[in-house]
Image (cartoon, rainbow, N blue to C red):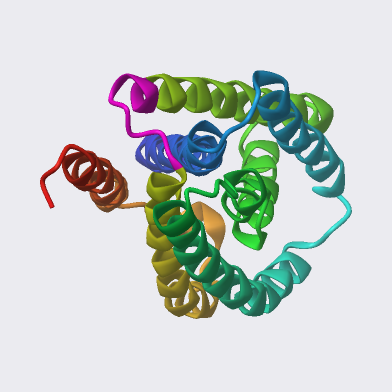
Amino acid sequence: MTNPLYIRKMVEISGLFLLSVFIGIIILALKTGLGCGLANLRKIEVVYIAFVYLILSIMFSYLVDVIPLDITLNILALGVTMHLIIALGLIYFGIHTKKEWLSHRKDISRKTFLWLSIPCPMCLIATFLACLALSKLTTINNLWIGIFVGVMFFLSIFSFSFVISSVSNALRIKNPSVLGNVMLLFGLFYLLSILIIPAYIQTQNVLIPNMTINMRDVIHSSIIMSSFVILGFVIDAYKRRGGR
């Protein structure tokens, strides 16, 4: 007979893992929403960006039973190089976006925001792992899992984009300079992730059902990243109002 305490423990771990998947989707949607909300985009263009994530989620849900987990981890390892390229791109174009606006009042955000909003290797792997986790921990059909994850991305990206655009307009800080600051912050975060990913891969000899997730660390990390973004908004608004 199966130990009831063991069953309860597995249910708790599964619940925490699913919660971490949802938090991961929201964080990635927030990143994309920041790029779309701070750039000079129309609503229909934001819908196009969100629709890309919806299609990718459905594609990945189909690949869950096709691509073994070992291959996924190998792809994750190869993604470190792409992370470096994207990190440097975010930093360079973040500075360039900010400089062009402050020096020449030239808005290039419609092009440079793509470094922040278009799916990066981290987004692609996280989307695949979200579909994989839901497939292993639930009995839902993979196609419906893909639709569910995709709809979550779609609604979250559009909502974050609308809220960020509205708030930044209300505070009169919606300009390419703020977008440049956000791109710089995420560029530095991507550089940090290059150190984290190899350490993550080395721990994969532990089976997924036995892993534990420190939700306190996840929440603290989210709060810290959000604080940096808010601080960038406040500093930029202070400078624009004559506090130089």
Say whether residue 45 is left or right of residue 11. Answer: right
- Spot occupied by residue 102 in the image (x, y as percentages of width and height): 39, 54
Percent from the top left, x then y, of residue 123?
62, 52
Q: How many marks?
A: 0
Q: Is residue 182 left or right of residue 125?
A: left
Q: In the picture shown, does residue 101 fall above or below 187?
A: above
Task: Name the residue rendered at 66%, 73% in the picture.
Answer: 82
Residue 170 shown in magenta? yes
Q: Is residue 140 visible?
A: no
Residue 121 at least partly seen: yes
Q: Nearer the viewer, residue 231 or 196?
A: 231
* Location of residue 188 with respect to 158 vertically, above or below: below
Q: Nearer the viewer, residue 99 or 150?
A: 99
Bounds of the magenta span? Answer: 167-175
Task: Look at 26% across and 53% down and name the residue there.
Answer: 217
User: Could you tell me residue 201's position as x and y percent?
Assistant: 55, 75
As drawn, is 115 to the left or to the right of 146? left
Q: Name the residue at the front extreme.
A: 104
Write down the quadrant of residue 164 in the picture.
top left
Q: Position of residue 68 (x, y in %)?
A: 80, 62
Q: Does the magenta run of residues contain 179? A: no
Nearest the viewer among 125 and 48 is: 48
Q: Residue at x 83, y 29 (%)?
A: 143
Horizontal side, residue 11 vs residue 126: left or right: left
